[in-house]
Amino acid sequence: MSTGTTVGIHDLSFATTEFVLPHTALAEYNGTPIGKYHTGIGQRSMSVPAADEDIVTLGAAAAAPIVARHGADGIRTLVFATESSIDQAKAAGVYVHSLLGLPSATRVVELKQACYGATAALQFALGLIHRDPSQKVLVVASDVSKYELDSPGEATQGAAAVAMLVTADPALVRIEDPSGLFTADVMDFWRPNYRDAALVDGQESIGAYLQAVQGTWKDYSEQGGRPLEDFSAFCYHQPFTKMAYKAHRHLLNSAGHDTDEAVVERALGRTTGYNAVIGNSYTASVYLGLAALLDGAEDLDGQTVGFLSYGSGSVAEFFAGTVVPGYREHLRTEAHRAAIERRQPIGYDRYRELHEWGFPTDGGDHPTPAGTTGPFRLAGIGGHKRIYEKR
């Protein structure tokens, strides 16, 4: 039951990898015209993790600035959303909890439903805070997007983590009721336990995404949600940035609105800057869109933003948020841009080496090659146990 308390995103921070592969290098290797990447799918480069980076190191790096600013006081829940899980039983968030030095009186859980998982985590957090407004919830969305070399999905890969502190009386975005929901059993994208790289049916996935867009908006409208005219921007899941444009045109068409290019660009262009250079970050993607929007030059005080979260398989949700007046005082724009600019460009051969690198599965002691200059690293494995360290 709602307490009448205003709840939402109080702080937001993201981290990405040590390395970056420009799409020019990928195009040079495979002979693809660069326009297919830059214009066709709307991507410029993709973040590539070092051998000693994974969802835990990225998630801890994203969350550490939030804990440094606000302290651990009141954080009684850490929800970790990922589809790049490193263990079938233990939540990756437990490692993050340890690296950040959070109190033992904390619940930690991992959520999974393809790219939708972070929105499930956010809704989980909102419910906890409505029940007890004195609590804070740390939501971490962290993923490494990986497809087979030379596959159609290769150019959309990426990696990043977004951490959000969810509280009562938030400083950035107030999340509103209701939500529009949609679920359908679709095999558009999946990763069996025995595979490192995902399987994807590209055309099926696009169709499933568009079906989910229409379904969530229909339910949102039936639940008494805002009209389209109320929204100044839309943060979509961006497996590649041009997919967000396709999805928004579909929403406008299905709602009987004009799909004028200037209108679509106005609604989406401000949300794609980070995703275009990081690549697909799965669960973090929608909230990288939010970070790009908030970090932009335009003043958004009091404006309403729509969120469309889609996870293959498929589950989707549409909801609204209002940007809190004075939000600019709480942004991390310089740190976010520095996280992108610090990445070291690599060539295609080095990228292939990192893509194919992995631990043996014999349970022995295997140190990890040093690569990251970030605050946390995966030092190796021993006795089937992952070993993390602070730098």
Image: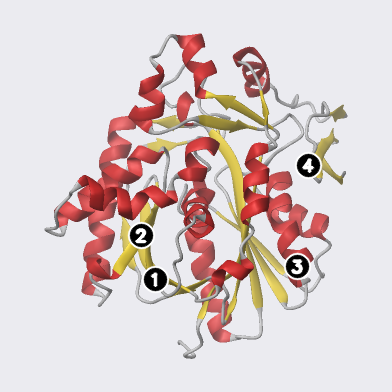
Residue 247, horizontal then vertical, whole percent: 28, 47
**Which of the two labelled residues, at mark 1 and mark 4, occupies the earlier sequence position?**
1
Q: Which residue lies furthest to the left in this view?
A: 256
> Label 2: which residue?
233
Q: What element carries label 3?
A: helix
Residue position marked by numbered label 3 in the rendering: 69
Q: Residue 10 carries which label?
A: none
Q: How far apart are marks 1 and 2 (CA)?
A: 8 Å
The earlier-in-sequence mark between 2 and 4 is 2
Q: Name the residue under label 4.
A: 374
Rendering quarter of residue 54: top right
Q: Report the Cα–Cα distance between label 2 and label 4.
A: 33 Å
Tell me the kind of residue under disc 4: Gly
Q: Which mark is in front, 1 or 4?
A: 1
* x and y percentages locating residue 62 in the rendered image: 68, 53
Task: Residue type at mark 2: give it.
Answer: Ala
Looking at the image, residue 30 sits to the left or right of residue 264; the answer is right
Answer with mark 1 or mark 2, whichever residue precedes in sequence. 2
Report crowding for label 2: few under 14, some 14 to 19, many 20 or more residues within 10 A (C-alpha).
many
Q: Which residue is nearer to you in this view: 258 or 61? A: 258
Above or below, 83 against 255 in this view is above
Location of mark 1 (residue): 303
Question: Which residue is more in the foreground, 49 or 378?
Answer: 49
Q: Are marks 3 and 1 in contact (CB under 8 Å)?
A: no
Closer mark to the observer between disc 2 and disc 4? 2
- The image shows residue 1, relative to residue 159, as above or below, that is below
Q: How far apart are marks 1 and 4 (CA)?
A: 35 Å
Residue placed at 37% from the left, 48% from the top?
269
Q: Distance between the residues labelled 3 and 1?
A: 26 Å
